[in-house]
Image (cartoon, rainbow, N blue to C red):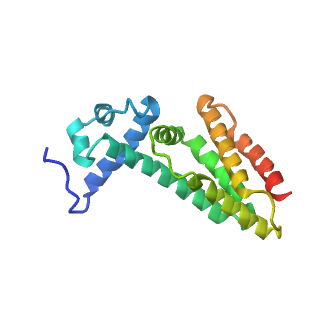
Amino acid sequence: MAGRRTEDRPLSFIEQARRDQLVEVTIGVVAEHGHAAASLARIAEAAGITKGAVLYHFASKDAVVAAAHAHVLDALVADIGAAVDAAPADGAPAAYVRRMVGHLAERPDHARMIIEAMIHDHRPDSSARWKPLATLLGHAREARGLGPGPDLRTLAIITGGAIDAIVGERLQDPAYDAGAAAEALVAMLESAAFA
């Protein structure tokens, strides 16, 4: 095999397909074995290629894991963004909660990938987690003609923790009804934010 791929030309169709495959395989390996045990050898074995072939597409284990993490976050943001954009302003917080829980419950490997990334120092600024929901709550209050109310940052942080707990329970018990739990959380949020 030729040396490492250079960045001076666009990816061919085959190179892009292989990178996409390696990202998907890495998500599965990290979800199943954890970040520490997701070696290049394990990723290569799961993909059915050599370690050298992985290194042709990604400079290191950290690079392929970072690409997998970015893929998972991009999919999450796109899915939630579409749900929020489709909802009226006064219903956007509920759409956010339902889709966040739904997305992660439907994609347990993605949820595990996010957890592993957070454990291994890929922690974003905390405002990146609570600020989008706090903003949606503020717009929903305005759309409902409500003035100043509860601390929206605190409500968003509490809601984020509840989402984490629901998804965590679903990861432990695949029979757990995450959709019903999301509806209960939406009802609590509605009561706290708009009463």
In front: 187, or 177?
A: 187
Q: Residue at x 23, y 59 (%)?
A: 7
Query: Which x, y percent locates residue 147?
Result: 82, 68
Q: Residue at x 53, y 41 (%)?
A: 111
Judge whether residue 99 can be spotted in this image. yes
Query: Which x, y percent locates residue 110?
Result: 50, 42
Query: Which x, y percent locates residue 135?
Result: 67, 63
Q: Quadrant of the N terminus?
A: top left
Total tally of numbered discs in the picture: 0
* Vertical side of 151 occupied by 2: above or below: above
Outermost residue toward the right?
A: 195
Query: Which x, y percent locates residue 3?
Result: 14, 47
Judge whether residue 50 can be spotted in this image. no
In front: 25, or 151?
A: 151
* Vertical side of 156 occupied by 167: above or below: above
On screen, residue 70 versus residue 92, left or right, reads left
Q: Residue at x 45, y 42 (%)?
A: 121
